[in-house]
Image (spheres, rainbow, N blue to C red):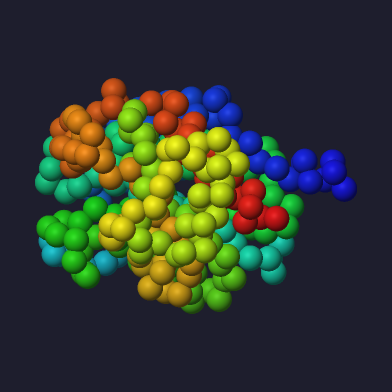
């Protein structure tokens, strides 16, 4: 029994953090900008598909069209499934990879860092596949709004993914959205509009992983990819560092040309990876 429990435990290592960071940097260097509905975005999706496939994930494209303030656009989500039992519940991990339309923003932290994190997590899950529940990784397109974060602008990929899960009748235990977690001065916030049960699990996982000083709840409401999943009736949480700037409390790198690879670090992605893996180890028991 002890050996079985040990085998089921997932670990996120410094090598995994290095892979996450390297993937993020390569995504920025090769595919910036990667605004939705463009050839640049398609090439970015292809890059991530190849990177996750190289880690042993079976990745598929989920292409769809949606109306936006700038007309109809085509979007591409990427989905990787680690299925153990077709009747078992799912834990879904989500990161967007797109950059904001019309803004000079490489998106090293905002989009690339957590997309690289999901690639590294794919390798962890391939090496030690969960024994009881299923895990899905989703790289969403169209998280960034065209004009303003209102009901019909932004979060297109998450809306599409949430709708698909709802219509499939999938038993989803939890949705964990990760965003802007490569910041060298990392502090992970859990917005107030995250599911309370998952917020408690995140804090417990942080304590067990020895990174509790890097994670806390906030009273701020954040409109991010977790929102469509909550609206679809799923438990969802957003793990985000929304203080990304030149001094504590500032966010002046966000959506600017300053969101560059020198602002992200392996050590921050190691913390983020340990937190997510810690949550998985609790949820997959």
Q: Quadrant of residue 185?
A: top left
Task: Name the side, left or right, on which 132 lies relative to 209.
Answer: right
Task: Report x, y in % for residue 276.
Answer: 52, 45
Task: Name the side, left or right, on which 74 lies relative to 131.
Answer: left
Relative to 229, say whether 20 is above or below. above
Q: Is residue 57 visible?
A: no
Tell me which residue sits at (59%, 62%) in the image: 90
Tell me which residue sits at (22%, 39%) in the image: 249
Q: Quadrant of residue 258?
A: top left
Task: Report x, y in % for residue 30.
Answer: 30, 29
Locate the C terminus by quadrant: bottom right
Tell me which residue sits at (52%, 63%) in the image: 197
**Of 92 and 205, the residue lying toward us:** 205
Tell me which residue sits at (25%, 37%) in the image: 244
**Of 21 and 276, the residue lying toward us:** 276
**Of 206 and 68, the residue lying toward us:** 206
Q: Quadrant of residue 256?
A: top left
Number of numbered discs overlaid on the protein picture: 0
């Amino acid at each position: 029994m002890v050996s079985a429990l040990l085998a089921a435990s997932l670990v996120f290592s410094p090598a995994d953090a290095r892979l996450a960071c390297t993937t993020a940097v390569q995504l920025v260097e090769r595919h910036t900008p990667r605004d939705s509905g463009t050839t640049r975005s398609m090439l970015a999706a292809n890059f991530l598909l190849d990177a996750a496939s190289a880690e042993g994930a079976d990745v598929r494209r989920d292409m769809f069209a949606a109306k936006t303030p700038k007309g109809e656009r085509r979007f591409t989500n990427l989905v990787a499934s680690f299925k153990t039992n077709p009747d078992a519940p799912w834990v879904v991990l989500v990161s967007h990879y797109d950059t904001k339309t019309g803004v000079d923003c490489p998106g090293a932290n905002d989009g690339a860092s957590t997309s690289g994190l999901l690639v590294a997590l794919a390798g962890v899950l391939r090496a030690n596949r969960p024994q009881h529940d299923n895990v899905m990784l989703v790289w969403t397109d169209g998280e960034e709004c065209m004009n303003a974060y209102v009901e019909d602008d932004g979060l297109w990929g998450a809306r599409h993914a949430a709708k698909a899960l709802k219509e499939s009748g999938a038993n989803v235990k939890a949705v964990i959205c990760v965003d802007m977690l490569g910041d060298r001065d990392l502090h992970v916030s859990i917005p107030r509009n995250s599911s309370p049960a998952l917020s408690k699990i995140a804090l417990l996982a942080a304590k067990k992983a020895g990174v509790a000083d890097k994670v806390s709840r906030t009273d701020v409401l954040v409109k991010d990819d977790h929102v469509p999943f909550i609206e679809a009736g799923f438990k969802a949480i957003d793990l985000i560092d929304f203080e990304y700037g030149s001094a504590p409390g500032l966010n002046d790198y966000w959506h600017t040309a300053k969101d560059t690879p020198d602002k992200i670090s392996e050590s921050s992605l190691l913390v983020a990876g340990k937190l997510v893996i810690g949550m998985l180890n609790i949820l997959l028991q």
